[in-house]
Image: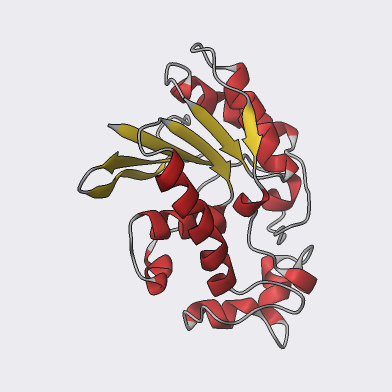
Amino acid sequence: MAEWYFVRHGETKWNAERRVQGHTDIPLHEPGRNALQFTAKRLALVHFDFIYSSDLVRATETAEIIIAGSKTNPPEVRIDPMLREVSFGDFEGMTWEEMSSSDQGLRLHQDQRNLDYAPPKGESYRDLLNRLSKFADFLQLNHAKDDVLIVGHGAALRALVVKLLGLNDQAYWSLTGLGSGSITRLSCRRTGNVMINWNEVGHFPI
């Protein structure tokens, strides 16, 4: 049976500074690149029929590091903008603390589990779920028998897994955040998709 692997991109300087990234195209920093060697080693012997990545550079660089460490002759990365992170609009570049303290701060809406609030010039989590629903449909239609690696972002991968498991949108809030370089795995079965693990980080040294 097919298995789908979901890897959150490695750490960036903005991650380390707790800055909101969203669609802002921030590359990995050196500590993030170094840490991803452990993710690459964990996946080195896994054969992937297809590899997809968000078009943002922190995701494509992560995919390249995983491919460079592979021992299974991996396929080329297919870039898909549908896998982008949620857009935080005018909040991008702020720290999470700055964003949360603003008059329209996102934290209050997250605490209230409000899927429909959108930051100024940004996306709501409902928008994100609807966008990733399209990729989930594509994945199930075209890759039900393939082992696939998908490299993306914390919120976007959470939304994608919600859709692949057939959960309602509010289930988004029940999934914990994903760590940088973490691995999540689903099994595609005739009876439905099943989560094997969520946010695996055991490949990193303590």
Q: Quadrant of residue 59?
A: top right
The colour scheme used here is secondary structure
Q: Quadrant of the C terminus?
A: top left
Q: Residue at x 41, y 30 (%)?
A: 147
Question: Furthest residue to the bottom?
Answer: 103
Question: Furthest residue to the front?
Answer: 141
Q: Residue at x 69, y 85 (%)?
A: 104
Whether residue 80 appears in this view of the structure is yes
Whether residue 32 appears in this view of the structure is no
| Horizontal side, residue 24 vs residue 59: left or right | right
Q: Quadrant of residue 201?
A: top left
| Horizontal side, residue 46 vs residue 58: left or right | left
Q: x, y (%) of residue 58?
A: 70, 41
Q: Vertical placement of 64 versus 166: above or below?
A: above
| Horizontal side, residue 21 vs residue 153: left or right | right
Q: Vertical placement of 34 versus 155: above or below?
A: above
Q: Vertical placement of 159 versus 9: above or below?
A: below
In terms of depth relative to the viewer, which is nearer, 144 or 26?
Answer: 144
Q: Quadrant of the N terminus?
A: top left
Q: How many marks?
A: 0
Q: x, y (%) of residue 55?
A: 70, 44
Q: Residue at x 53, y 76 (%)?
A: 110
Q: Vertical placement of 171 versus 147: above or below?
A: below
| Horizontal side, residue 27 vs residue 124: left or right | right
Q: Residue at x 52, y 58 (%)?
A: 134
Q: x, y (%) of residue 123?
A: 66, 72
Q: x, y (%) of residue 127?
A: 58, 71
